[in-house]
Amino acid sequence: MKYKKRTHTCGELREKNIGEVVTLNGWVDTRRDLGGVIFIDLRDRYGITQIVFEPHYHQKAHHDAKDLRSEWVISITGTVRKRPEGTENPALETGIIDVMVDEITILNKSVTPPFQIQDEIDVNEDLRLKYRYLDLRRRPMQKNLQLRHKMYQIVRNYFSENNFIEVETPFLMKSTPEGARDFLVPSRLHKGHFYALPQSPQTYKQLLMVSGLDRYFQIVKCFRDEDLRADRQYEFTQIDVEMSFVDEDDVFTMMEGLMKQLFLETLNVKIETPFPRLTYKEAMETYGSDKPDLRFELKMINLNNIVKDSGFKVFSDIIKKGGIVSGSNAVGCGNYTRNQLDVLTDFAKKLGAGGLIWIRVTDNGLDSPTMKFFSDDEKQNITKALNAKSGDLLLLISGEWKKALTVMGHLRLEMARRMNLVKQNSEPKLLWVIDFPLFEFDEEEKRLVAMHHPFTSPKDSDIGLMEIEPLKVHAKAYDLVLNGNEIAGGSIRIFSRELQVKMFKTLGISKEEAEEKFGFLMNAFKYGAPPHGGIAFGFDRMVMLFANENSIRDVIAFPKTSSGLSLMDGSPSLVDDEQLKELHIRVKGGG
């Protein structure tokens, strides 16, 4: 079919174009027939232009337009005019003009879409995902993908300007399951053997440092076979970075520069650097999270020194066992009813707390069923520590250190929501969380595991503790947090073969297992590995936050559902027996 190619996009024409003959191509967004004059909003990804079919202006074009419906694809040629006075549309960038149509070509018709192509729609997400190609016609979705594209370009330009080299690493690699489950790919040529899709390019980027490519980055797809949620997908995108001959400060400075550029060029927001830093211990004890939201205060206070000898045995006994009593002041919430306080108590219990101690602060002192167990000095010191005034509500939780603080952190977020402490368009808050433990004890597996990954370097001063008190060893690890969301994590790596062997030994990884899983990396360390470190950004999550969306599915072109399905193309799907036979695979139970 012959048609005229567009001279302008549907978001381009302005007052300066009045009188010009133009050709526009696009989709029929809306159609209005007002007394014989047909008005069409013509849409493409650049915007909307109103086009007009008037019988007295051009009878044939008007006749050809009578059957037009939403989502038909058309090409029109006509003359740009200024809209009649009083009909301008300030909501459109093209709202001063419209186009009087001389000629129309219908390029393709459309059946009635399963939902309207509008900015705001109340449609089940599964329907949107099934017809994703229609969902992506909506301006909010196109705006998100344009933002994502822009962020890609900023990242690439920033690292290129700072002497980094972009290197692609393999998608078919050796299975080294240390985090989530691997996605496995059977080999046709090597019967019974499998590749794995990379959970991250971690070992490859360390090998690139051994190779002498001292500054590497990559915007890379990664794969994890894990349960999905709003900020997680089987396949996700990382900004992967590694640098040689650096320490933590060098990494921080380089990444702060990137964040500064991203905020300025995408949101026109100036952020201050350097970002604040909190140790893991400070973050947990002050905010109840290793990814604290600093957009509001509502800090938590360690009350151990005040109540360690208290007559309230729940507290004193917990502290003797190495636990913690944490308190927070919900300013102005002293008028909470007993029912509201019971709801908060249930909230804490569902998260695993043994209970919640609440204290109303009144003109006559502290009001709580537990106050009879506290001395006057303890009451006074609790009031002072939490900076409490009449009308406030004090909330206290006790228990094992990490568990109690985590519950208190969730309660902090819940109270912030109730108190409306996070304002719309509030200033972004970034920080580094540092000095993580190198190891943690996995209760399910009953063994030590690496809190980050087994290539993370311990603090130099703590190396001697690895074999005697491993849980006291701190890591040269760090996370970058934005508004309560971890957006990046990294570490200075182990680059000594001897230290890496010690790390594997502490984790209970035998020499044979280490050789089988990581022998290629260990061999590389024999040939002069430089000190190196890096970081990886969760790019999808970052775009989600910049776009002010609640799900990464809204910033990915073709995402999976929360159950890992692609409703649009029907994957995962069955394959025929011949394909399975070639791969030496037989599916039990048929199928």
Image: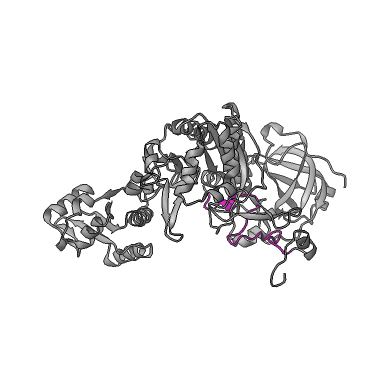
Residue 361 percent location from the top left of the image: 20, 56
Q: Which residue is drawn at 75% across and 56% down?
A: 69
Relative placement, left or right, of 147 versus 437 is right
Residue 192 percent location from the top left of the image: 70, 58
Residue 280 percent location from the top left of the image: 38, 44
Q: Reply yes or no: does residue 483 show up in magenta.
A: no
Residue at the far left in the pictured view: 376
Magenta-highlighted residues? 549-574
Q: Reply yes or no: does residue 562 show up in magenta.
A: yes
Q: Residue at x 68, y 31 (%)?
A: 16
Q: Nearer the viewer, residue 464 or 210?
A: 464
Image height of 31 relative to 83, above or below: below
Image height of 473 relative to 111, above or below: above
Secondary structure character of the magenta stretch overall? loop
For the C terminus, which image quadrant? bottom right
Q: Note whether residue 427 is visible.
A: no
Relative placement, left or right, of 390 versus 77 is left
Q: Which of 541 and 440 is in front in this view?
A: 440
Relative placement, left or right, of 106 versus 136 is right
Residue at the far bottom in the pictured view: 589
Q: Note whether residue 448 is visible.
A: yes
